[in-house]
Image (cartoon, rainbow, N blue to C red):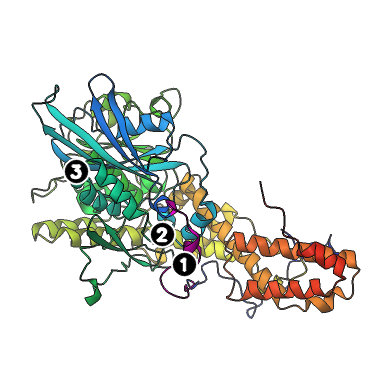
Amino acid sequence: MALQGPEELGEQVEEPEDLDDQDASSISPAEEITLPAWPGGDEEPEEALLLPWDRFSTWLHCICVVGFDLELGQAVEVIYPHHSKLSEKEKTSICYLSFPDSNSGCLGDTQFCFRFRQGSNRKSSLGCFLETTDRDAPPCLKREQGHYYGYVYFRQVRDKSLKRGYFQKSLVLISKLPYVTFYHSLLKILAPEYFEKQEPCLEAACNDIDRWPTPQPGRILTLPIMGVVIKVRIPTSYDKPGTSQLVQSTQSDSLVSIVLPTIHEVDLFRCFYPVFFHIQMLWELVLLGEALVVMAPSPAESSDTVLALVSCISPLRYCSDFRPYFTIHDSEFKEYTTRTQAPPSVILGVTNPFFAKTLQHWPHIIRIGDMKQTGEMAKQMKVKKLKNLKTLDSKPGVYTAYKPYLNKDEDIIKQLQKGVQQKRPSAAQNAILRRYFLELTQSFIIPLERYLASLMPLQKSISPWKSPPQLRPFIQQDFMKTLEKAGPQLTSRLKGDWIGLYRHFLKSPNFDGWFRNRRREMTQKLEALHLEALCEEDLQQRIQKHTEVEAVDLVLKLKDKLSQAEKEQMPVRPGTLAKLRAHIEAVILALPEDLQGILHKPSTPDL
């Protein structure tokens, strides 16, 4: 919203004449922000206002039990808490996605996850609160808007007392949070208890979760559940990429049973082991938002591999759709398998052999074998032609006609191979691979960030009585010109067609999502600096030059500006909003009493 003085309502922002002045400070889009400290203990002010089940809702939408009925097939038997709402379409999706495909042959206990579309535009009563808790989360850990995650613990054991001869049941956690490692750890505690003690156990677990603190990024949380205590830290967007803020055990942690070093990261090396000669090509395909299908022997391997692919471009957020486990019963099956149009930008994880034929027209197919490492070396594999993929029994490998833009990095392959030969711990191999992907992504994204910073107006161009200046437009040709002197060659040793890779990326959903997010953050920064400039003005002296009507108009504009800043949690200096609120109050008190009464009335709430 533009905020202008009454006499300057039609005036536009002028560009400063001396843009090249070396003393003129430009506003950095990546300026460091300090997280606010919450006074008086661990509980935030907003948390004191939460109602029963509100805390539960910040972690989970609901807990489902899915069983198998001989007449009905898969069915949702129980939903906790009982007031939780799921549409019939959502229940159907959960039913089919909560059981492994019959070809998987999963005996015993299996854990995996899936992701499905939210059936209706259901608004949460915690909307504003969730926005606040989500604000400081890294892009890859923000709450899902149009999708749910399902975290599954499936048990299949022989039982002669049942007609089918097998006991088959899944305990499923439905959440908007992508905390895959955390929820799988939680299920390892909940599910065995549930299978032994049934429903009373779920009720007790829900009550425990409703006493947890909310998942606020940056805080170390102690979470008691079923007599066990889990200690975790939710990462923030201000953490240095590639560093793990490990939760340290202390003497006061005598009751803590489990300390989780990460809430969301999967083991990249284990997931990519069957195809690790092609990791760099896979990174390119994910970066460019190409249509990818992962064919695996089980939902666990399918979902882990899809999540590994999505996370390999971190800290960049993967902005297209992805389905860690996808079945022929999925509501998007026809949409994603049609041959009448090009495959969509999506990553699918499948286990049914039927997909080998149905998705034969897809451009990139990854076939994953059994991930249980035997300690053998993965064999050097060439990229296979798509026509050679006929069934899910085809050999593990990558089936594609794609030609990578960048030359192959032999060093990382040799380093990982050496690790296998020397029996280096899996955690160390995973750390090496994660660091490699991080450095590759950062080398790619730094030139984009540098160019974006140049689009930011100079700080001295911000006037409190004019609209905040706008970001200059992103011009692809201008960006490309910067790559010659300030491209990825400054930070990466890799050679190849970087220019071609950038051209392709700028047309992808991942660029669109990244640019929208960064533009929103930078626009907020400009709005915040505009607010700070307003706070330095003597508003009372200014209104003395204007009529009462103009003064009232100014106060209304200032109140709107303040309300917007509070709603959007703008990154202003501490005390800025309180100072502006005091300025507004002083201006109101300088007006006649009848006008004071009008201006002190609260705004009409949005319906």
User: Residue 197: which numbered mark, if any?
Assistant: 3
What crowding class fits label 3: few (fewer than 14 Cα within 10 Å), some (14-19), or many (20 or more)?
few
328 or 320: nearer the viewer: 328
Amino acid carrying mark 1 in the image: Glu
Residues under numbered marks 2 and 1 in contact, where contact means CB atoms less than 8 Å apart: yes
Q: Earlier in the sequence, mark 3 or mark 1?
A: 1
Q: Is residue 445 above or below residue 324?
A: below
Q: Earlier in the sequence, mark 2 or mark 1?
A: 1
Amino acid carrying mark 3 in the image: Lys
404 or 556: nearer the viewer: 556
Instruction: Quadrant for the N terminus, please.
Output: bottom right
Q: Residue at x 32, y 26 (%)?
A: 328
Disc 2 secondary structure class: loop
Residue situated furthest top in the rendering: 71
Q: Which residue position is annotated with label 2?
A: 214
- Nearer the camera: disc 2 or disc 3: 3
Q: Which residue position is annotated with label 1?
A: 44
Distance from Cα at disc 2 to Cα at disc 1:
9 Å
Q: Determine the image quadrant of residue 402.
A: top left
Distance from Cα at disc 3 to Cα at disc 1:
35 Å
Distance from Cα at disc 2 to Cα at disc 3:
28 Å
Q: Determine the image quadrant of residue 216.
A: bottom left
Amino acid carrying mark 2 in the image: Thr
| Whether residue 471 can be seen here | no
- So how many labels did they put on this image? 3
Where is residue 574 shown, x and y percent of the image? 57, 75
Task: Give the magenta part as a residue range.
Answer: 36-54
Disc 3 secondary structure class: helix
539 or 186: nearer the viewer: 186
Residue 44 falls within the magenta-colored stretch: yes
Name the chief secondary structure element in magenta.
loop
